[in-house]
Image: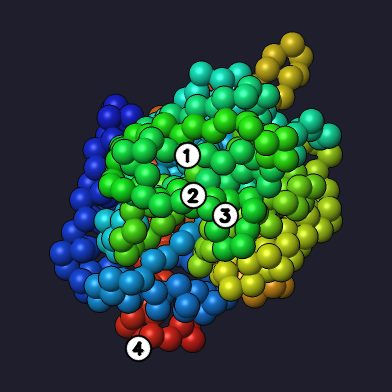
């Protein structure tokens, strides 16, 4: 039965048990990821990757190499999303579990969201004494073109300082910026070579460090009018070790259409060289009353084509959003009612995944299907707006996604490195 008494406290205890179950997997190689530790609002039979799971074989080959202690293997994963991703709790949960199992190659992409006037994940901070203007992909006709993280910050100050602080050490930084941005430098005591454009790409720069650090100050001075456009998009923090890099960026209100209006986002993000690209959009696309499934199909198709064109070596995986509610006002009262468009958007994503033979994670079904948001709210793991989850809710979502990935990976290993049997 569903938890009674003190649902919030019991949910925390359940999630702690989930964490213990996943940690135990590393100690017992043959163990399946456990479904029994989840609350009964979850549909464990639906919590699996569907569609063309066989497309994930290149990713699983690399995971297997990491599991065999290949010291040269690095897996790069990129997750693109909206406010559900921007908060950081969902992707961080997936990152921590994958890195615990297969090795930690670094924090990966961090984005100067607080400098852009919005919320930032809690495990890093980017601060600056400069005055910054900002834009993002949601704003139409933005004064500054957003970059690879879906946003940009720009300053007209002649001297620039950016302070980065994280919870884990790094010894190299990939900086993503406007092609005419001034060169970022580090203190002489940390410099380990010349900072230079990377991969013949004038929109990203490699900054090597002489030793691992958890915080650093990046500086730039505008001395050349040809490099005076001080716009920055994000930084990838890496440690040079084998393992998993899990990059993610989310923009509040983001949609498939917003990304498609800014094709430079996908083009620049290709510099992360992702083995896997995860697209977690759809809530905002379906929120309005004017939602059109035919247009949603078009927008999903356009983004799939853009990713395939710019990242031809990457595997693409789509996820569906769970049910959410809309605010309704009737007879002088305001209440929240499940949005029927959410299910329609889910069908659009599943349809396009089937058409393009992509793997897909159906979170809508795994979370409980129709009526799920009310049940998550009753359990204390969804916010009062019944659109967003609580911190614990997003962590549960992350554990579910990791579990689904590991089920497919275990299937791959048990069938001698093949995924001919799809997990539908």
Q: Is residue 90 visible?
A: yes
Q: Residue at x 68, y 17 (%)?
A: 334
Residue neighbourhood size for the residue with mark 4, other residues' Cα within 10 Å, grouped as few (<14), some (14–19), many (≥20): few
Instruction: Classify residue 232 as left or right of residue 12.
Output: right
The tag earlier along the polypeptide, 3 or 1, is: 1
Whether label 2 touches label 1, CB < 8 Å: yes
Residue tagged 1: 185
Mark 2 lies on a secondary structure that is loop
Residue 121 visible from this viewpoint: no
**Percent position (x, y) of residue 318?**
60, 60
CB-based contact (under 8 Å), mark 4 and mark 3? no
In which quadrant will I find the N terminus? top left
Q: Is residue 331 left or right of residue 416?
A: right
Distance, label 1 to label 4, CA atoms, is 48 Å
Residue farthest to the front, as pictured: 223
Q: Say which residue appears at 72% left-offset and 58% top-offset.
A: 303
Q: CA distance from mark 4 to mark 3?
A: 41 Å
User: Of label 2 and label 1, which has the lower sequence position?
Assistant: 1
Residue neighbourhood size for the residue with mark 3, other residues' Cα within 10 Å, grouped as few (<14), some (14–19), many (≥20): some
**Element type where label 4 sits in the image:** loop
Mark drawn on residue 416 = 4
How many neighbours does mark 1 have within 10 angstroms: few (below 14), some (14-19), or many (20 or more)?
A: some
Whole-percent x, y for residue 412 in the image: 39, 79
Q: Quadrant of residue 217?
A: top left
- Report, in whole angstroms, how far the alpha carbon at label 3 lies from the one at label 1: 13 Å
Q: Are marks 3 and 1 in contact (CB under 8 Å)?
A: no
Residue where numbered disc 2 is placed: 195
**Viewer-side label of 2, 4:** 2
Residue ID for mark 3: 197
* Residue 58 tag number: none
Q: CA distance from mark 2 to mark 1?
A: 7 Å
State the separation of the CA atoms marked 2 and 3.
7 Å
């Amino acid at each position: 039965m569903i938890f009674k008494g003190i649902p919030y406290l019991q949910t925390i205890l359940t999630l702690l048990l989930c964490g213990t179950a996943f940690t135990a997997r590393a100690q017992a190689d043959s163990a399946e990821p456990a479904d029994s530790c989840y609350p009964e609002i979850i549909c464990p039979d639906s919590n699996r990757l569907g569609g063309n799971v066989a497309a994930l074989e290149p990713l699983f080959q690399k995971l297997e190499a990491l599991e065999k202690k290949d010291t040269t293997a690095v897996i790069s994963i990129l997750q693109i999303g909206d406010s559900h991703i921007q908060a950081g709790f969902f992707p961080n949960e997936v990152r921590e579990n994958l890195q615990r199992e297969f090795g930690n190659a670094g924090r990966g992409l961090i984005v100067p969201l607080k400098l852009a006037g919005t919320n930032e994940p809690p495990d890093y901070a980017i601060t600056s004494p400069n005055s910054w203007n900002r834009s993002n992909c949601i704003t139409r006709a933005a004064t500054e073109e957003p970059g690879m993280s879906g946003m940009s910050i720009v300053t007209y100050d002649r001297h620039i300082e950016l302070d980065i602080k994280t919870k884990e050490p790094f010894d190299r930084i990939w900086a993503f910026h406007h092609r005419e941005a001034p060169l970022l430098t580090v203190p002489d005591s940390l410099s380990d070579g010349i900072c230079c454009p990377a991969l013949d790409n004038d929109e990203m720069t490699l900054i090597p460090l002489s030793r691992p650090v958890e915080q650093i100050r990046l500086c730039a001075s505008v001395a050349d009018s040809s490099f005076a456009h001080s716009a920055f998009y994000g930084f990838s923090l890496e440690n040079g070790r084998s393992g998993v890099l899990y990059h993610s960026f989310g923009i509040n209100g983001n949609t498939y259409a917003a990304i498609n209006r800014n094709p430079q986002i996908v083009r620049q993000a290709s510099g992360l060289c992702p083995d896997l690209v995860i697209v977690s959009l759809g809530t905002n696309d379906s929120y309005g009353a004017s939602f059109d499934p035919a247009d949603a199909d078009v927008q999903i198709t356009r983004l799939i084509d853009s990713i395939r064109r710019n990242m031809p070596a990457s595997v693409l995986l789509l996820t569906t959003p769970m049910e959410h509610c809309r605010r309704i006002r009737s007879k002088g009262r305001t209440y929240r009612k499940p949005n029927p468009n959410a299910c329609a958007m889910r069908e659009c994503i599943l349809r396009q995944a089937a058409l393009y033979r992509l793997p897909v994670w159906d979170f809508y079904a795994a979370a409980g299907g129709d009526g799920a948001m009310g049940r998550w709210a009753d359990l204390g793991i969804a916010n009062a707006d019944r659109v967003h989850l609580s911190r614990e809710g997003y962590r549960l979502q992350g554990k579910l996604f990791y579990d689904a990935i590991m089920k497919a990976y275990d299937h791959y290993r048990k069938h001698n490195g093949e995924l001919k049997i799809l997990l539908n």
